[in-house]
Image (spheres, rainbow, N blue to C red):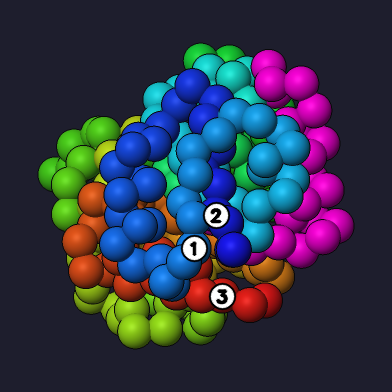
Amino acid sequence: MMKAVIIDYGSGNLRSAQKACERVAPAGMQIAISSDVNTVQKADYIVLPGVGAFGDCIAGLKAIPDMEASLNNAVKKEAKPFLGICVGMQLLAKEGHEHGIHQGLGWIDAIVEPIPPAPGIKIPHMGWNNLNIQLPHPLLAGIHTGDHAYFVHSYHMTGSNGALPPHCLATVQHGKNLTAIVGRDNWLGTQFHPEKSQATGLKLLENFLRWKP
């Protein structure tokens, strides 16, 4: 039986993410929530949710013995499909600059910093907004520029000198172009919440749970 695991490290909409995955999972696939390192290591698909401050989330993840090493092994060495959601995506960066500077997982050469203020926008960026697809990717099959997704965030992932980070697959306009999706190889991260993004989010989750990178 194929298994997808949503990592429970004290942060994230775990049950809503599980329910959304269950709606679109292939027949017979188990969608579990777990903080057990061995369960994560044995999973076929791995989801890292995240709600709250970057520093709190990375501290919670690192507080689980061997979880960071297990993630690195499962995703980077064994090439298992991985999806990071909201702060779960942000944790893939080298650093997060929310209430101090915190080291991330370092899977992508990027930092997470405050959304810059701009006339006519509100921070946090909250609610529905249009995706702007930058690059094709298997998980974006059936998802197009202009499709709506649901965002809730005050910090965003950026590359050097304020440019978009490497491997940015989609952006969202909120004062400036912000990173909406990053991905390469066998992993993907979304700044928006697929489990709250109705048709767009369910399509992405469906693509993910059938992905064979």
Residue 186 at what x, y percent from top left? 67, 67
Residue 204 at what x, y percent from top left? 39, 69
210 on left or right of 143: right
Using the image, determine if residue 207 lies above or below residue 80. below
Using the image, determine if residue 150 lies above or below residue 121. below
**Near-viewer residue (122 or 75):** 75
Quarter of the image for the C terminus: give it. bottom right
Quarter of the image for the N terminus: give it. bottom right
Using the image, determine if residue 195 lies above or below residue 155. below
Q: Which residue is mark 1?
A: 29
Mark number for residue 211? 3
Of tags 2 and 1, the one toward the viewer is 1
Q: Amino acid at mark 2?
A: Ala
Q: How far separated are the C-alphas under marks 1 and 3? A: 13 Å
Q: Residue at x 79, y 45 (%)?
A: 72
**Near-viewer residue (126 or 116):** 126
Q: Which residues are magenta?
A: 62-83
Q: Are marks 2 and 1 in contact (CB under 8 Å)?
A: yes
